Image (cartoon, helix red, strand yellow):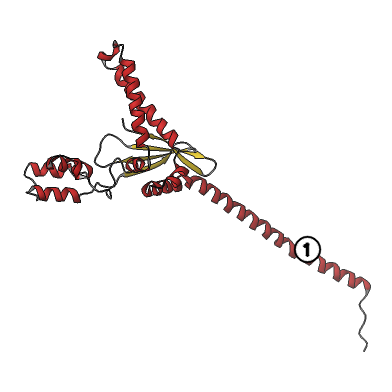
Amino acid sequence: MARAKPKLGDLCRKQEGTRRRSKRGSLPQRGDAMDKRYVLAVVAAGLVIGLYVASPYWAVHRARSAIAARDPDALDRYVDFPAVRESLKNQFAAQVAEKSSHDDRLKDNPFAPFAQAFAASLAGTMIDSLVTPDGLARLANGGAKDAEEPFEASKYKTFDEQLRAAAKRNCAEALVADAERGIGPYKTFDAVYAAVIEARCPPAEVVTRYKGLDTFLVEVSSSGKRDGPVVLVFRRTGLFGWKMTSVRLPL
């Protein structure tokens, strides 16, 4: 028997059905693309926020590495030297003015302002020499000298001066005090001196925290000192950049 030919109406309905199924199948594809774009946007926003929050920690790490390496070129990227020097000079001037205002001997002395100006000028010269890669390395270590620096014994006239200077440098004053009282394992000067030279200051305690969105504080405390921490103040430059702009000393 001859196969019946499909009618024109049947062909049109079949084509329309195919077209509708095609449209229904394409809707989830567009939805998937929108979902992917949304996820990518959320991930990108999260990365930007993470970098924004973490940027000072990275800057402090890089600054400490540059300080430890005494790398002036790298330090220029993380330390505003003129601003740091100015902050220290202002602190010293304020400290001198405060002490002078409480000293009855200076209140009526006409030469007191000249003495204060001379002290501020002298302090400015000292601060200019302090705010260097080596000076910042000492501040970042809580005021202790670098253990890798050789001890210059020739600077001192007597063995007792050498011993006490080395003990102060290496945070070993308690060891010397015990030896003077006859306490401890070291009974001779040579044994005490050798122990002092080998001693090392404990590592500085470092606390980092935000103070607002654009200020980041690094508080460095030496375990052997009780006069408060040295505070390194970093300020935001741009979106992710940071620079040390001041140092607060426990005056």
Circle 1 — which element?
helix
Residue sitting at 35 percent across and 36 percent down?
129
* Placement of the C terminus among the 4 image quadrants: top left
Which residue is nearer to you in this view: 18 or 210?
210
Q: Amino acid at mark 1?
A: Lys
Expressed as whole percent of the image width and height from the top left, the position of residue 200 reads 23, 49
* Placement of the N terminus among the 4 image quadrants: bottom right
Q: Classify mark 1: residues with Cα within 10 Å, few (<14), some (14-19) or many (20+).
A: few
Residue sitting at 54 percent across and 41 percent down?
238
Residue sitting at 71 percent across and 59 percent down?
30
Judge left or right: residue 7 versus residue 75: right
Asked if residue 97 shows in the view, the reply is no
Give the image quarter of residue 218: top left
Expressed as whole percent of the image width and height from the top left, the position of residue 208 reads 39, 42
Expressed as whole percent of the image width and height from the top left, the position of residue 7 reads 93, 75
Q: From what the image shows, is residue 86 above or below residue 196?
A: above
Which residue is nearer to you in this view: 66 or 141?
66
Expressed as whole percent of the image width and height from the top left, the position of residue 55 reads 48, 46
Judge left or right: residue 15 versus residue 88: right
Judge left or right: residue 214 versus residue 129: right
Residue of label 1: 23
Q: From what the image shows, is residue 1 above or below residue 202?
A: below
Residue sitting at 24 percent across and 41 percent down?
224
